[in-house]
């Protein structure tokens, strides 16, 4: 768990993100990833891991498509459960850092609209053409 050894957790998160990237690259068709390597940099910043150089190098080396979809916090539908333990304020902070990290990494961010899942899917498909 992350709270037992934050540095080790971050290293494992990075290794698994790189592994996933390599397993799915190159892609012969449009492929979506729920999380990316920059998420590890976001997480490291949020929990105060001091040394980001290895993560930043990975962000530079392993590149996704230039446009990234990002889901803003949405208070009306936000819930916590056994897997999602962040309260809403922490989710907002995470979103802010995530947005900043992906921009710093040179990605164009496209915010998902606050609409039904079907309408979101249509929006995404329109964006990827």
Image (cartoon, rainbow, N blue to C red):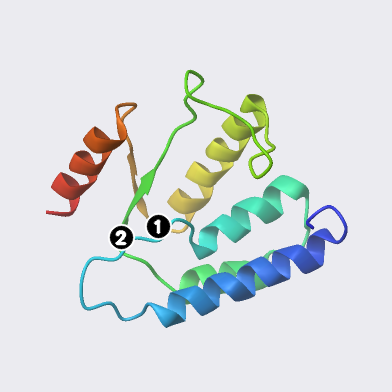
Q: Quadrant of residue 126?
A: top left
Q: How many marks?
A: 2
Q: Secondary structure at mark 1?
A: loop
Categorize mark 2 by other alpha carbons within 10 Å: few (<14), some (14-19), many (20+): few
Percent of width and height locating residue 118: 24, 37
Q: Residue at x 18, y 54 (%)?
A: 128
Q: Residue at x 61, y 60 (%)?
A: 40
Percent of width and height locating residue 42: 61, 51
Say whether residue 1 is left or right of residue 103: right
Say above or below: 35 vs 20.
Answer: above
Percent of width and height locating residue 100: 51, 44
Q: Residue at x 44, y 56 (%)?
A: 34
Mark number displayed over residue 106: 1
Q: Residue at x 51, y 20 (%)?
A: 75
The answer to which of 108 and 113 lies nearer the viewer is: 113
Categorize mark 1 by other alpha carbons within 10 Å: few (<14), some (14-19), many (20+): few
Say whether residue 97 is left or right of residue 44: left
**Image quarter hosting the C terminus:** bottom left
Mark number displayed over residue 66: 2
Disc 2 vs disc 1: Cβ atoms closer than 8 Å?
yes
**Image quarter hosting the N terminus:** bottom right
């Amino acid at each position: 768990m992350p709270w037992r050894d934050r540095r080790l957790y971050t290293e494992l998160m990075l290794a698994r993100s790189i592994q996933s990237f390599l397993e799915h690259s190159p892609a012969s068709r449009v492929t979506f990833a729920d999380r990316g390597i920059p998420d590890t940099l976001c997480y490291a910043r949020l929990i105060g891991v001091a040394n980001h150089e290895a993560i930043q190098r990975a962000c530079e080396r392993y590149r996704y498509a230039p446009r990234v979809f990002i889901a803003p916090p949405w208070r009306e539908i936000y819930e916590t459960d056994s897997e999602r333990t962040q309260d809403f304020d922490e989710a907002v902070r995470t979103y802010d850092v995530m947005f900043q990290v992906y921009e710093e990494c040179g990605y164009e961010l496209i915010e998902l609209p606050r609409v039904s899942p079907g309408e979101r899917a249509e929006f995404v498909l329109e964006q990827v053409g």
